[in-house]
């Protein structure tokens, strides 16, 4: 940003007319443009000036690709050419190359026409044979597919008939057996009735007594199952003190998605546990029959409540969430335990209900049996008559069904054999047609290869002759192998040349290098990759050491060095074979100094020197300095300056103390 000083000048002279003070208008003083450096510690170097020559990093001699007489020369020394530009032309008329090329070209054109015509005809024949082969394959596939369906249909029909025969045989055999069994059972039932009808009533009474004993056993099993089931629920819910400590670590995660289920489960557990304790203490083995049946009803009621409890517990676990204290495996284990206990409770309930229903049914049976025994005998006698009639009818119908199905089986087998014969004939015809089409296609392929190979051989020969003569004509053009500048020309029109002649020299003008010789004293200060300064007519550029000879020349005792120019203004300004100044920096020791370029010094005579420093507010300040050793460009400042001060190095003669300055970027 530019800084401007505003100066206000006030004059207090008397005016003849009014005697008032006069104010002069403000004026702006623009800053002066300079360049400066910030002082930093540096090692002191001495600049060695050497002479170098601009050359190309690629320079070769061009030789022709064929012998003959030069017909024309297109370039001269110093011309810039592009890659593949024609530099000179060798005469090809005298050796009849052009005439021969016309003859060979005609032969090639005729042979190419014959080849194209022959190839087109052979390809047409081959394509037709291929189409016939593909059609034969498709026809074969279609025949196999259709005949397979015919075969499967005929086989399915036979299997259906065989299955019908088997089913009919089994059905009639079973019907006869059942009819015979029915008759025997009817007779046996009557015999058993006549023998045992009095004992039936005694058996029912005995069964009732046994059923009551089973009810007592069922009550004991229910107590054991209820006890274990309630304990498993308490293990999860922790309602009682027995399992409270285990429940504390994960209680908040139980039924966390819907806490209503947990409250319902805890209430049901408390009610069922209290009922279970009461019933257990109330139960007695000496109950009368009426007391036992009444108590059994209370056990069934409790089983209903237990089933309800486990339904709610399943909902509690389904609406729980896992955590570090209620991991998924633990929750899955709880669910499995609840399912197992719920299954046992349902089983107990089913058993209880069944025994209760059985007891009720038995009571009803004893009552009804007493009244029905008289009517059963006549019923059993009538059943014997019906069973005998059923057996007679079954025997009569069996013979007719088996005869009919056997006739159908024979007819279906004959149809299957005829179908198989037809299928074999159709498939053999399709196979033969495919073999014929394959042989025709193979013959077309062989004919295509043999005939085309002969014509192709003629075409290859004509092509080789044409390409050979074209190459000879192309070799008559001497061309630039890369873009560059012509450095030498050793031919004129009418000159005779051979493939060993060096007719042109060409150098790459894009990538320029500086070549110089360095003595053994200074070579030790150079390394590959080091940057050096190049000067020509006051213009400077940088370069990089790209080649450093490892040994001195036998005659000159000098080391060969090449410097690759960095692209820039001087690179384009310099031309090949210009001489330039090359400056090599020679470091003098490892000690650091305050070093300034000579352009920063103001010389006042009598070895008095000063510099301009950019001070506060970008105002110029002057410093008296004492100088020390110097080289061609820089000098050591012994006293008068400090590190990090900004010293003006360019246009110092154009400024004065207290001038406002601005840095040129």
Image (cartoon, helix red, strand yellow):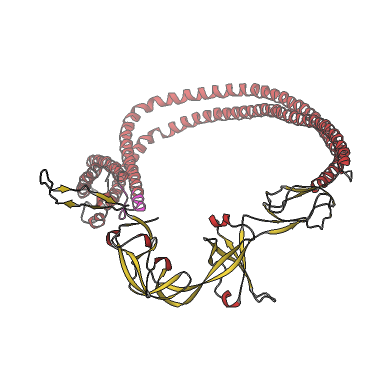
Place of residue 187 in the rendered image (x, y in percent of width and height, measured from the top left): 50, 29
108 or 263, which lies in front? Answer: 108
Residue 641 appears in view = no
Tell which of 552 and 535 is nearer to you: 535
- From the viewer's perspective, is 480 left or right of 382? right
In depth, the one of 465 and 615 nearer the eye is 615
User: Percent position (x, y) of residue 596?
Assistant: 41, 69
Which residue occupies the extreme left position in the image? 19
Q: Is residue 331 magenta?
A: yes
- Give the percent coordinates (x, y) of residue 539: 52, 59
Q: For this view, does 145 lie left or right of residue 664? A: right
Q: Identify the residue at horizontal 21%, vertical 53% (top origin).
A: 240
Instruction: Tell me the quarter of the image containing the C terminus.
Output: bottom left
- In the drawing, does residue 495 fall left or right of residue 506? right
To which quarter of the image does residue 579 belong?
bottom right
Is residue 179 at all visible to an observer of this figure?
yes
| Residue 89 x/y as whole percent | 79, 47
Residue at x 39% of width, y 56% of height? 664
Point out the stretch of residues depicted in magenta.
321-334
Q: Residue furthest front?
A: 16
Vertical comparison of 518 with 295: above or below = below
Queried whether the magenta region covers residue 108, the answer comes back as no
In the foreground, 439 or 421 = 439
* Among the 4 quarters of the image, the one containing residue 393: top right
Q: Is residue 504 left or right of residue 245?
A: right
Reply above or below: 311 against 395: below
**How many marks can you see?**
0
């Amino acid at each position: 940003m530019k800084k401007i000083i505003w100066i206000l000048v006030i004059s207090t002279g008397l005016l003849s007319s009014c005697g008032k003070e006069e104010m002069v208008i403000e004026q702006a003083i623009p800053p002066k443009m300079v360049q400066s450096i910030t002082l930093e510690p540096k090692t002191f170097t001495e600049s060695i000036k050497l002479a170098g020559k601009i050359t190309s990093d690629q320079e070769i001699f061009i030789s022709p690709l064929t012998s003959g007489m030069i017909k024309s020369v297109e370039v001269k020394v110093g011309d810039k050419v592009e890659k593949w530009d024609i530099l000179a032309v060798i005469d090809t008329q005298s050796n009849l190359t052009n005439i021969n090329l016309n003859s060979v070209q005609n032969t090639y054109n005729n042979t190419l026409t014959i080849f194209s015509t022959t190839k087109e005809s052979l390809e047409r024949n081959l394509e037709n044979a291929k189409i016939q082969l593909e059609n034969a394959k498709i026809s074969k596939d279609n025949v196999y597919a259709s005949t397979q369906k015919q075969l499967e249909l005929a086989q399915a029909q036979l299997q259906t008939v065989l299955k019908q025969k088997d089913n009919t045989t089994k059905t009639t055999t079973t019907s006869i057996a059942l009819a015979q069994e029915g008759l025997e059972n009817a007779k046996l039932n009557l015999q058993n009735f006549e023998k045992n009808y009095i004992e039936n009533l005694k058996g029912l009474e005995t069964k009732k007594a046994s059923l009551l004993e089973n009810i007592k056993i069922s009550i004991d099993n229910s107590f054991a199952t209820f006890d274990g089931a309630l304990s498993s629920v308490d293990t999860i819910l922790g309602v009682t003190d027995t399992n409270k400590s285990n429940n504390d670590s994960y209680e908040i995660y139980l039924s966390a998605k819907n806490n209503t289920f947990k409250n319902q489960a805890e209430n049901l557990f408390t009610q069922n546990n209290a009922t279970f304790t009461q019933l257990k203490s109330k139960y007695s083995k000496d109950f009368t029959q009426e007391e036992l049946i009444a108590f059994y009803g209370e056990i069934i009621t409790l089983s209903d409540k237990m089933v309800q409890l486990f339904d709610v517990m399943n909902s509690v676990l389904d609406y729980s969430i896992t955590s570090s204290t209620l991991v998924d495996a633990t929750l899955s284990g709880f669910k499995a335990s609840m399912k197992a206990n719920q299954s046992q409770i349902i089983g107990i309930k089913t058993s209880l209900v069944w025994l209760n229903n059985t007891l009720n049914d038995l009571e009803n049976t004893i009552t009804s049996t007493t009244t029905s025994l008289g009517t059963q005998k006549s019923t059993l006698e009538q059943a014997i008559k019906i069973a005998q009639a059923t057996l007679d009818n079954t025997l009569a119908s069996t013979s007719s069904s088996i005869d009919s199905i056997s006739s159908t089986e024979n007819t279906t087998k004959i149809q299957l054999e005829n179908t198989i014969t037809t299928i074999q004939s159709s498939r053999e015809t399709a196979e033969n047609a495919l073999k014929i089409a394959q042989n025709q296609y193979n013959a077309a392929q062989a004919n295509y290869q043999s005939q085309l190979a002969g014509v192709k051989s003629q075409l290859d020969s004509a092509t080789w002759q044409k390409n050979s003569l074209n190459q000879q004509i192309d070799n008559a053009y001497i061309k630039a192998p890369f873009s560059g500048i012509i450095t030498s020309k050793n031919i004129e029109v009418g000159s005779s040349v051979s493939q060993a002649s060096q007719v042109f020299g060409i150098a790459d003008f894009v990538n320029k290098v500086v070549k110089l010789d360095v003595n053994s004293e200074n070579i030790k200060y150079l390394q590959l990759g080091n940057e050096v300064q190049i000067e020509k007519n006051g213009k400077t550029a940088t370069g990089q050491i790209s080649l450093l000879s490892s040994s001195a020349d036998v005659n000159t005792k000098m080391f060969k060095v090449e410097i690759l120019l960095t692209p820039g203004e001087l690179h384009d300004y310099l031309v090949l074979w210009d001489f330039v100044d090359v400056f090599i920096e020679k470091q003098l020791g490892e000690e650091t100094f305050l070093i300034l370029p000579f352009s920063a010094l103001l010389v006042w005579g009598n070895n008095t020197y000063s510099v301009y420093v950019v001070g506060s507010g970008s105002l110029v300040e002057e410093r008296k300095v004492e100088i020390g050793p110097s080289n061609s460009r820089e000098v050591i400042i012994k006293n008068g300056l400090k590190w990090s001060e900004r010293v003006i190095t360019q246009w110092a003669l154009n400024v004065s103390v207290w001038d406002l300055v601005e840095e040129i970027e």
